[in-house]
């Protein structure tokens, strides 16, 4: 997608070698999200250069994202591709449409790279779920997560429920989603939702340090490791250690080729 096409849906992409930074760039509405933005995110994720090894997702200004653009709940915006436009579809077609929206979030799990949500200020609803779609969350102490969907009569449907349960456990996830309460940056780090919480003034440096550490291993190592770890909870020990062996043999061969080359 061209910078102009991305700008039209409130996104910015900066690629610097192995690091891609995606910025939600609608600060005037606190980086509120639209279906057009989700479709573009999915497209953008599928077209990142092969040598990108870290993707940083962030928001312009002091807010990560205020979630769904409330204009999408205005009956005046009930056209195709909007949230209210789903009402005109059959259940099956509406579900298929939401699946297209979800692809704007799922690609962040791709083992080709490690994704980092860099969160300052509010991360509400779809904003919270976008942060949850990333592998890691580095948050400022002014971060405020809220799964606000229940307060609007909705459920979180942008792929956030599974990682939330994985990070904080079922009971805490239910409490956070059902009450829509605010989880501060400090609490997020304490309950395993965020990798780390730092003073807001130190957020850029903390993310830069993490990015540098993640791109430091040989290309391919982190991808193999992420693949191993991603599915570990769903596998038994024998299956997991078989995959460890197979990955290691690939690493041996890659190292030998690198030394020979
Ligand atoms: N959609 C559209 N515009 C939004 C917005 C949103 N979600 N959030 C904020 N804005 C706009 C405001 O209308 C305001 O515009 P004007 O300057 O034209 O009045 C501007 O952004 C600044 O907003 P605030 O003055 O409220 O800014 P703040 O810094 O005081 O507060 C905030 C920030 C806490 C995020 C607050 O704006 C807020 O609570 N926003 C609504 C959050 C929300 O309910 N989001 C929906 C979550 S549910 C979801 O995401 C569902 C889903 O995917 C299915």
Image (tube, rainbow, N blue to C red):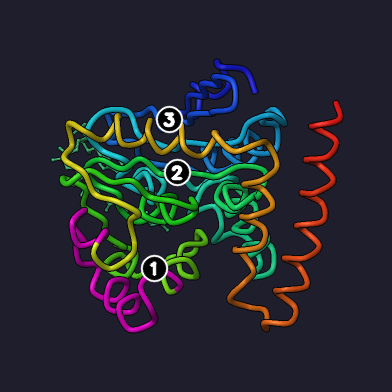
Q: Are marks 3 and 2 in contact (CB under 8 Å)?
A: no
The label on residue 88 is none
Q: Earlier in the sequence, mark 1 or mark 2?
A: 2
Location of residue 47 by image quarter: top right
The label on residue 116 is 2
For the residues labelled 3 and 1, the Cα–Cα distance comes to 26 Å
Q: Which residues are magenta?
A: 166-189
Q: Nearer the viewer, residue 200 or 216?
A: 216
Pointer 3 local density, CA inside 10 Å: few below 14, some 14–19, many at least 20: many
Q: Is mark 3 within 8 Å of ligand 1?
A: no
Q: Nearer the viewer, residue 57 or 125?
A: 57
The label on residue 154 is 1
As helix, strand or loop, the secondary structure at mark 2 comes to: strand
Q: Are marks 1 and 2 in contact (CB under 8 Å)?
A: no
Q: Nearer the viewer, mark 1 or mark 2?
A: 2
Q: Quadrant of ligand 1?
A: top left
In the image, is residue 58 above or below residue 240? above
Q: Earlier in the sequence, mark 3 or mark 2?
A: 3
Determine if the magenta segment contains residue 172. yes
Q: Quadrant of the N terminus?
A: top right
Q: Is residue 51 left or right of residue 254?
A: left
> Main SS type for the magenta part?
helix
Determine if the magenta segment contains residue 179. yes
């Amino acid at each position: 997608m061209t910078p102009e096409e991305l700008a039209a849906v409130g996104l910015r992409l900066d690629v610097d070698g192995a690091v891609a930074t995606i910025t939600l760039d609608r600060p005037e509405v606190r980086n509120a999200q639209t279906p057009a933005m989700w479709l573009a995110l999915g497209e953008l994720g599928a077209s990142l250069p092969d040598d990108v090894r870290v993707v940083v997702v962030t928001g312009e200004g002091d807010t990560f994202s205020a979630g769904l653009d409330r204009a999408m709940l205005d009956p005046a915006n009930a056209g195709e591709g909007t949230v209210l436009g789903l009402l005109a579809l059959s259940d099956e077609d509406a579900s298929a449409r939401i699946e297209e929206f979800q692809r704007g979030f799922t690609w962040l799990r791709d083992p080709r790279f490690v994704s980092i949500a860099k969160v300052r200020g509010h991360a509400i609803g779809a904003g919270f779920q976008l942060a949850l779609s990333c592998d890691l969350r580095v948050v400022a102490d002014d971060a405020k997560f809220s799964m606000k969907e229940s307060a609007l009569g909705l459920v979180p449907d942008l792929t956030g429920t599974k990682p939330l349960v994985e990070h904080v456990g079922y009971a805490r996830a239910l409490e956070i989603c059902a009450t829509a309460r605010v989880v501060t940056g400090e609490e997020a780090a304490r309950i395993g939702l965020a990798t780390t919480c730092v003073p807001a003034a130190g957020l850029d440096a903390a993310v830069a340090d993490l990015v540098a550490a993640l791109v430091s291993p040989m290309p391919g190592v982190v991808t193999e490791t992420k693949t191993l770890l991603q599915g570990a909870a769903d596998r038994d020990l024998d299956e997991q250690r078989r995959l460890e062996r197979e990955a290691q043999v690939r690493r041996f061969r890659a190292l030998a080729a690198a030394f020979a080359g």
